[in-house]
Image (cartoon, rainbow, N blue to C red):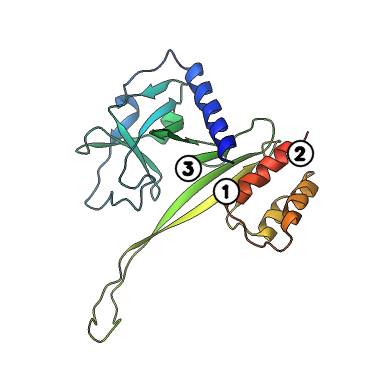
Amino acid sequence: MKKYFATTLFAIAISLTLHAQDSVHPDFDKISTPYFYFEGSFNGKNLLFDNNWVKAKLLTANNSILSNDSFLFNFDKIDQRLLMTADFKRVSEIDWREFKAIMFYSRDTAYIFKHIYYISNRDLFQVLINDNSKYSLYKTIHTKLIKGHYGSTTFSTPNAKSSDQYQDVPEYCILFPNREYRIIHLLKRASIERVFKLNPDGDIVDDFLNMDRNKEYYNEDDLVRLINYLNKETL
């Protein structure tokens, strides 16, 4: 899976770079606005990269690539905002209408996210598998803030307050060859079977699932393997 994912990222990155290699410039001011935040906005749990902001390349709406290593980026998973800063004294938000895709990178690791506008205007979809003629797989993460509350938890601490918690809720989007799509929230066998119930390739999915008949729950790696299996077995 890692080899395929690395190859996919490399192919997308190269295609983006070649497509707009003459358009690289460092001017982000035209597509960003000041982001007004309060103390605690960036505690790490609501950010894609915790407190370790990363460098990035941006594919704009007019197919230019913006790249400037003086800026660091992050993504607020709660408000679905792409954020940028040069010094952490001033943070800007990049308008979601102004960019098509972004490649976050840190050292030797890259993460591709893109907009799929006919599915969602503002959500960023992480590219897990990208295939223009077969099946593709994308992931979105919505983080919920669960507020702590006061309560009489023990005799010694009658007014103890439980701490706030952040819960990541991943969703997986399977894009079919005909460009229809299905969303999976829970990676259960029954949910996967339901997605492909009326699909011509349903038998191939059943073959994959029947490799381990006793398995009821799946994880992200399993789903990636399934889509790779589909792309390999379909014409």
| Gap between marks 1 and 2 measured at Cα | 21 Å
Q: Residue shown at 21%/35% (left/top)?
A: 87
Residue occupying the point 57% across, 48% down: 172
**Quadrant holding the C terminus:** top right
Label 3: how many residues lie within 10 Å, few (<14), some (14-19) or many (20+)? many
For label 1, the crowd category at 10 Å Cα-Cα, with few meaning under 14, some 14 to 19 and many 20 or more, is: many
Q: Which residue is mark 1?
A: 172
Q: Nearer the viewer, mark 1 or mark 2?
A: 2
Residue 118 in view, yes or no: no
**Residue at the spot 66% in from the left edge and 63% down from the top edge:** 216
Between marks 3 and 1 in the image, the one whose residue lies nearer the viewer: 1
Look at the image and tell me whether residue 52 can be seen.
Answer: yes
Instruction: Return the mark for residue 123.
Output: 3
Type of amino acid at the residue the image marks with label 2 = Glu
Q: Amino acid at mark 3?
A: Asp
**Closer to the N terminus: mark 3 or mark 1?**
3
Residue 29 x/y as whole percent:
29, 26
Secondary structure beneath dot 2 equals helix
Residue 117 in the figure: left or right of residue 132: left
Which of the two residues, 63 or 106, is positioned nearer the viewer here? 106
Q: Residues within 10 Å of mark 2 (few under 14, many from 20)?
A: few
Q: Residue furthest top?
A: 22
Residue under numbered circle 2: 233
**Residue 151 x, y percent position in the rendering:** 29, 78
Residue at 51% from the left image edge and 41% from the top image edge: 125
